[in-house]
Amino acid sequence: MASETLYWEDVVENSEIPTVSLEITRNRIVMIVCATRDIFPLHHDADFARAAGYEAPAVATAFLQGLLGRCLTDWTGPTGKLRKLSLTLNAPSYAGDTISVSGKVARKYRENGEHKVDCELAVVNQDGAATVNTLATVIIPSRG
Amino acid sequence: MTTEELSPELQKYVGRVSAFVEGPDEVNKAMIRHWCEMVEDANPVYTDEEYAKNSEYGGIICPSAMLSTWVYPRWWPPVEMPPDAGPAQLDLPLGDVPIPAVISWTDEYLLPVRPGDRIRYNTRLESVSPLKKTRLGAGYFITTTNYYYNQRDELVGTTQYVLFRYRMEE
C-alpha cells in the first residue's frame, strides 16, 4: 500500500518511477465501464469496435488517467498531489492487452512556494508499443 | 500542412462558452471505491476513513482523474440537454469530417474534491485550425477546455482536449 511519504529532497532527476501493470480482462472492461460511466460501445462491444475499424474494444481514456494517477501516487505516497496530467494518445489500449505504466523524473523545482516534480510516463502494451505518452506534475512535501 | 485559412464563419465560434452541465450525482464514496477497484489504487486518502480523517484533507477525497466522471450524464432515463449545454453548443459547421480522434487530453487539478461536492462544468472553444492534411486524413484540430466547479463556485480543475475531426482521403 502506498503509505510512505516521498520528500522533494529525496527525488533524483532522471531516476525511474516504479512500474505498475494491469491486464485488461473482460471483467476489468466491465469495471471500467461502471467506474468511468463511459458506456460508449467502443469501450465494451467487440462487434461495434471491429465495425469501427478497431481490433477489439478500446478502453476509455479516463481509465488510463486513473492508472497513471495510481502509478504516481503509489510512488509519492498519499501526501503527493497530482497537479497536471497531459496525455498524448498514440494508439488504443485494447481488451486483452496487458499494459504497464512506467517513467522517470524529468525535473524537480520550486514554484509559487510549492515543491514540484515533472515526470515523463508512458503506457506500454505487451508488444512494447507506447500507446500513451504522458507529462505529469506532482506536488510533494519538503523536509524544509 | 495548411491548405487554407480559417474561414471567418468558423473564427466567430472561437471563444464561445457553453452553458453549465450539472453532474447527476454528488461526489460519493461508492463511486470512488469503484474507481479504486478499477485501477487497484490503494491510496488510503481515497478509501480509508480513519487515515483520511487524520490526513491534511481531514476526510476522504476522490482520485484526481475522476473529474470527468462526476459530470458524465446518467444512462437512464434519457437526458434532455438544453441546446446550449456542454459541447453541443460547440458543434461547428465543419462540413464532411465525420471521424473524431482525441489527440491529447490535459487535466489540471486545482482543489481536492470530496464526498458531498456537486460538480458542474462548462466548455470553452479555444481554437480551431484551418483545414489540415495528416496521415489520418484531412480535417480540423479543435481545442476545447472544460472548466469544473464545485457548489461554492470554486474552480476545482480543467480538462483541455485537442480533437482532430477528419475525413479519410485516398
Image (tube, coloured by chain):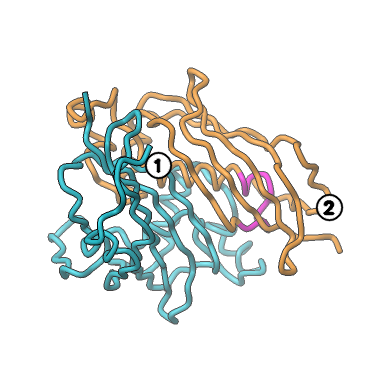
Chain colours: A orange, B cyan
Q: Is residue A87 above or below residue A18?
A: below
Which chain is indicated by disc 1? Answer: B
Q: Which mark lies nearer to you, 1 or 2?
A: 1
Q: Which residue in the rendered view is the most extreme toward the right? A: A144
Asked which secondary structure carries label 1, the reply is strand
Q: Which residue in the rendered view is the most extreme toward the bottom? A: B152
Q: Nearer the viewer, residue A65 or B52?
A: A65
Image location of residue B77, percent across then percent down = 13, 61
Q: Residue at x 40, y 61 (%)?
A: B145
Residue A20 seen by the camera = yes
Q: Nearer the viewer, residue A48 or B32?
A: A48
Q: Quadrant of the C terminus of chain B?
A: top left
- Residue B33 is a magenta residue: no
Amino acid carrying label 1: it is Ile
Which chain is indicated by disc 2? Answer: A
Image location of residue B65, percent across then percent down = 47, 54
- Alpha-carbon distance for marks 1 and 2? 35 Å
Q: Specify the segment rendered in magenta.
A: A72-81
Residue labelled with disc 1:
B103
Q: Residues within 10 Å of mark 2 (few under 14, many from 20)?
A: few
Q: Residue at x 74, y 53 (%)?
A: A5
Q: Residue at x 32, y 48 (%)?
A: B130
Image location of residue A15, percent across then percent down = 75, 36
Residue labelled with disc 2:
A9
Amino acid carrying label 2: it is Glu
